[in-house]
Amino acid sequence: MVGEAPSTPTSSLQYNYVLAAALDTGTAFAGIIIFFAVSYSGYSFPAWWGNTVFVNTVDGKGVA
């Protein structure tokens, strides 16, 4: 019939768990790499606008 979903999964849906496992593994691996990169003692985080702007506030200067 027109408009009905197929009763058998297609090849893209059949191996969806492989894609999900690959994405989960990549996320975990990236998290481990980022953790060790940030916790390295010789590492200094770049001074971007978003992570230094709090120093210029009243709370950051200790006035409040």
Image (tube, grey):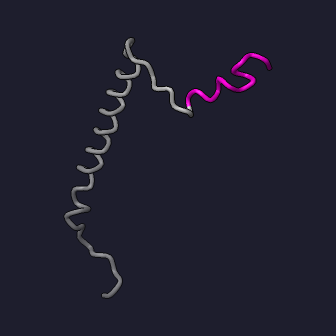
Of residue 49 and residue 23, the one placed in the foreground of this image is: 49
Would you place residue 15 above or below residue 46 in this image?
below
**Residue drawn at point x = 30 percent, y = 45 percent:** 23
Q: Residue furthest left?
A: 11
Q: Residue furthest top?
A: 41
Query: Is residue 57 inside the magenta stretch?
Result: yes
Answer with left or right where residue 53 lies relative to residue 37: right
Residue 3 place in picture, x, y as percent: 35, 83
**Residue drawn at point x = 35 percent, y = 21 percent:** 36
Answer with left or right where residue 58 lies relative to residue 30: right
Position of the N terminus by quadrant: bottom left
Residue 15 place in picture, x, y as percent: 22, 56
Residue 41 place in picture, x, y as percent: 39, 12
Would you place residue 57 above or below residue 25 in this image?
above
Residue 59 place in picture, x, y as percent: 73, 22
Query: Is residue 35 inside the magenta stretch?
Result: no
User: How many numbered tags mark residues here?
Assistant: 0
Q: Which residues are magenta?
A: 51-64
Magenta stretch, overall SS: helix
Answer with left or right where residue 54 lies relative to residue 43: right
